[in-house]
Structure formats: structure tokens, C-alpha cells
Image (cartoon, rainbow, N blue to C red):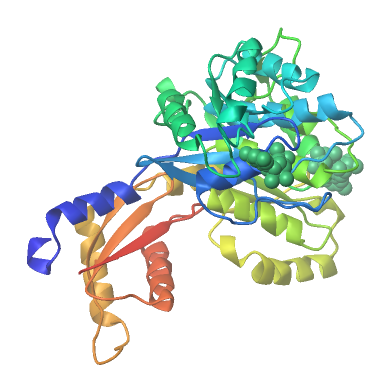
Amino acid sequence: AAEEGFDLEDVEGAIEAAGHGPLPVLAVVGRPNVGKSTLVNRIIGRREAVVEDKPGVTRDRVTYEAEWAGRRFKVVDTGGWEQDVLGIDASVAAQAEYAIDAADAVVFVVDAKVGATDTDEAVVRLLRKAGKPVVLCANKVDGPSGEADAAYLWSLGLGEPYPVSALHGRGTGDMLDQVLEVLPEAPRETFGGGGIGGPRRIALIGRPNVGKSSLLNKVAGEERVVVNELAGTTRDPVDELIELGGVTWKFVDTAGIRKRVHLQQGADYYASLRTAAAVEKAEVAVILIDASESISVQDQRIVTMAVEAGRAVVLAFNKWDTLDEERRYYLEREIETELGQVAWAPRVNVSARTGRHMEKLVPAIETALAGWETRVPTGRLNAFLGELVAAHPHPIRGGKQPRILFGTQAGTKPPRFVLFASGFIEAGYRRFIERRLREEFGFEGTPIHISVRVRE
Ligand code: GDP
Ligand code: GDP
């Protein structure tokens, strides 16, 4: 590194920054209008459109990356929720439940000016049951005179209320320091098959009516359902262990699939939250797409969620039994144009109704997980990069030719690379490198991350 003009410390720092494993998840929950979205904006330190004043507007983005005091984590915002036919208590509880389930720690936001309401008490009961670490945020304490309001919230029995003004930033630093105290360094369930990590975790996702529950019933019905982990409690089991192809897999958040919640307002948001929560808990996402219908923007959003979360991906095209030759033709064209971002994902054409190609699901999942865990030795990577750069140099810009000098794989799950360069590397050349990396090393079924460090 030194002879290429890079400071060794800089190189190590870049590798460490790029190599982080899956990030722990913080959920922000509470009643509508207590200031959850405003607080999430504070935490992520951007104004990025979280607060949306128009009711009924659907937001599909619910997870964000954040950093505080040098630690990175994910934040799940549940602020996009509208009251619906379930009634206020039930709907707040339902959204909080998913978020809490996917989280490693929770910030519970209460409006200190209003005080604790019955709905707040209902969320407290959920939090107790879940047993996750909780930080109590007494929001809307805009000045010292509001501190007394915050103190009343000791009555919730969740420990010290942190007086905060999400709007002005007052007190958020102290609250975040406390969050870091209780938030584990890594997600509670470590990734990795067998042993301590337990069974591999699959999220079966897809828009409503693509056949998720039919597929789940098919695989759980024909194969043996090993055990329902949380059976015996009053609550539905959230995750299910299912034996497939001789291996036990954990299908996460199956309750969300089986429970047919019929909602009017907020249904899309609810579905997004459920999907995001399932993806966070899983290692691999099996994305179910209804092959009998055109691939929709909603399908693409779900694909994007899984890719951005850095999960392994399998595409399953369902309802294959209904396809005629013409539809098959158009489907292939649609896949090319609409699903280009996951051209690397293994694909299976299935029918949950007839059981067609169910046996191909497990090999596809195994392929994707293998790609997700692939590690390329540094020597091999640099031999490859050396040849690549020699055969296809970066275009000359301003009389100079930026060069990739060396690289290393900083992490897996998904594979993350850091490349060190002598000058700015253009987006087109980065894409070219990604394509060639995939051609050379496979990475079937996994997103890959490439970051480039430029010599000072
Ligand atoms: P959510 O429904 O819980 O996500 O709540 P929002 O973040 O959308 O906030 C609801 C309303 O409360 C908005 O009008 C915010 O501007 C306001 N609000 C949020 N935080 C504070 C705060 O710390 N102080 C005051 N005075 N208002 C706030
Ligand atoms: P979910 O909302 O994604 O859980 O979808 P469901 O499993 O409830 O399925 C929605 C509808 O599609 C139901 O009427 C199913 O019977 C039907 N369906 C599911 N899978 C198939 C399939 O492979 N072939 C056909 N023809 N219909 C299917």
C-alpha cells in the first residue's frame, strides 16, 4: 500500500468501514403525531422527506441508515401509519409489533405535552412482552419548562424518560447516547447456518395476491413443519421452522403472511413495513412475482428493498400453471426491462397450486446464499484486477489516466469490496468492474458493494 502512495492507516480504515457486517436495527414506535418521523429525521441527520404532512400518502421507505458517535445502525420509522378500520389502538399495536419484532432496540416516543394515553399503555404492554431494550423519548419538550411534563412519564414503568425536542434537536444527543448503551453492536441473531446461528432465515415476500400464503402452505404442508417456535403463547407464531430438501429453514414473519389483515387506509404502508421487517430478519429473500400479470412498480420496490438491505435474492415466478405461450413470451421481455437490477438473481418458475418446480426452490436459495458468502482471496482479486486494468484501462480524463491500483474484499454477506485508485473512477467504469467481477467470481443471487478510495 505504501509504495502506491496510500497511508496504511487510511487503507485499514477504509477496509474496516466497508467491511461492517449486518447493522443492528433500532425501531422508532409510538402513536401517530407524537413526532416519530421528526425524530427519525433528526437521527438520520437529513431532511430527506420523512415528514409528509398529507394524510394517506404512501411511503414505501421505512428503513434508513444512521450513524451516531461513530457507530452505524439502521432505523425503522413507523411514522407513515394512518388510523384505519382496526381502530387506533389496534393499528398502532399492529405496526409497532412488526417493528419491535425486527428490532434490536426500540425508541418509544410519547408526546410529553399530552402525557401517557391508553394507546401509549397498549404499546408499553407490547414492549414488555417483547423484552427488547427500550429508550423512552419524552418528545415535544421544546424548552426547560417542559421538563416537568417529561418526568410524569416515569409512571409508564419504562425507566428514565429522556426529554427531547425532535423539532429543535434539544436533548436528542443524550437520548442517542442512551440508545447506543442498549443497542447491541450486531443484530441479535448472527448470520450463518447451523451451529450457534441456527437455521438459515428466509423472508418470503411479494405484493398482495402473488401467492405467498399458498406457497407457504404448499411447502409447509407437503414437507414436515418441524415446530412453531413461539407456539403455546397467545400470539401467532412469527417465524416457522420448515424442513425442505432435508434441511431445516426458518421462514421469518410467516404470521404476517398467514394473517389476512384487511385494511383500507394505510394498507400499502402496512405491507411495506411488514416486508421491510421480514427482510431485516432474513438472510435471503425469496421474492414472489405473479407471472400471470405484468411486473409492476410495486414488485420493483420490493426487489429494491431486498437489494438495498443487502440480502441474498431468489426470484420465484408463481402461477406458472396459468401461463400461455404468448404470456411467457412477454414475461421474458418484461423481466429483461423491469428486473435488470437483479439480473444476477437465480430464478425459479413455480406454481403454488400444482406444486410445479417446488423442488427447485431450495437449490436456488442455496446458490444465492453461497454467492452472498463468497470471499475472494486478496491475491486472486489483485491478479484479476491487474489483468483487467491492463486490458481495459480507464478512459483518459484531463490528460490523466486514473488507475485501479489494488483492492481487497472487506466483507461478506453481501460481498463488499474496496478498490484503491490513483484518481476519480467514473460510474461507467465502476459498473464495468462489477460486471467483470460477477463474470469472474459468480456472486449469483447476491448484491455486491464496491467502494473506491482515491489517493490524496
Ligand atoms: P409521527 O406521526 O409520530 O411520525 O409525528 P410527526 O413527526 O409527523 O410529527 C407530528 C407533528 O408534531 C408535526 O407537526 C411535527 O412538526 C410536530 N412535532 C414533532 N416533534 C416536535 C417537537 O419536538 N416539538 C414540537 N413542538 N412539535 C413537534
Ligand atoms: P398472498 O396474498 O401473496 O399470500 O397470495 P395468496 O396465497 O392468498 O394467493 C392469492 C390468490 O392466488 C389465491 O386465489 C390463490 O389461490 C391464487 N394462487 C396462488 N398461487 C397460485 C398458483 O400457483 N396458480 C394459480 N392459478 N393460482 C394461484
Q: Position of residue 371 (x, y in %)?
A: 44, 49
Q: Nearer the viewer, residue 347 or 48?
A: 48
Q: Nearer the viewer, residue 134 or 136?
A: 136
Q: Residue furthest top?
A: 232
Horizontally, residue 145 falls left or right of residue 124, namely left
Q: Position of residue 391 (x, y in %)?
A: 27, 81
Horizontally, residue 372 falls left or right of residue 69, namely right
Q: Vertically, is 50 above or below 145?
A: below
Residue that appears at 58% across and 64% down = 341
Q: Vertically, is 329 above or below 195?
A: below
Quarter occupied by the N terminus: bottom left
* Residue 140 in which image quadrant: top right
Q: Nearer the viewer, residue 104 or 331?
A: 104
Residue that appears at 65% across and 11% down = 155
Of the four image quadrants, the one with ligand 2 is top right
Q: Residue furthest left?
A: 3
Q: Position of residue 120 (x, y in %)?
A: 73, 21
* Residue 443 in which image quadrant: bottom left
* Residue 406 in which image quadrant: bottom left
- Residue 33 seen from this side: yes
* Number of numbered discs on residues: 0
- Residue 194 seen from this side: no
Q: Residue furthest bottom?
A: 399
Q: Position of residue 69 (x, y in %)?
A: 36, 39
Residue that appears at 72% across and 20% down = 116
Q: Vertically, is 69 above or below 291?
A: above
Residue that appears at 67% across and 48% down = 287
Q: Nearer the viewer, residue 326 or 63?
A: 63
Quarter occupied by the C terminus: bottom left
Q: Vertically, is 412 above or below 134?
A: below
Horizontally, residue 19 falls left or right of residue 163, namely left
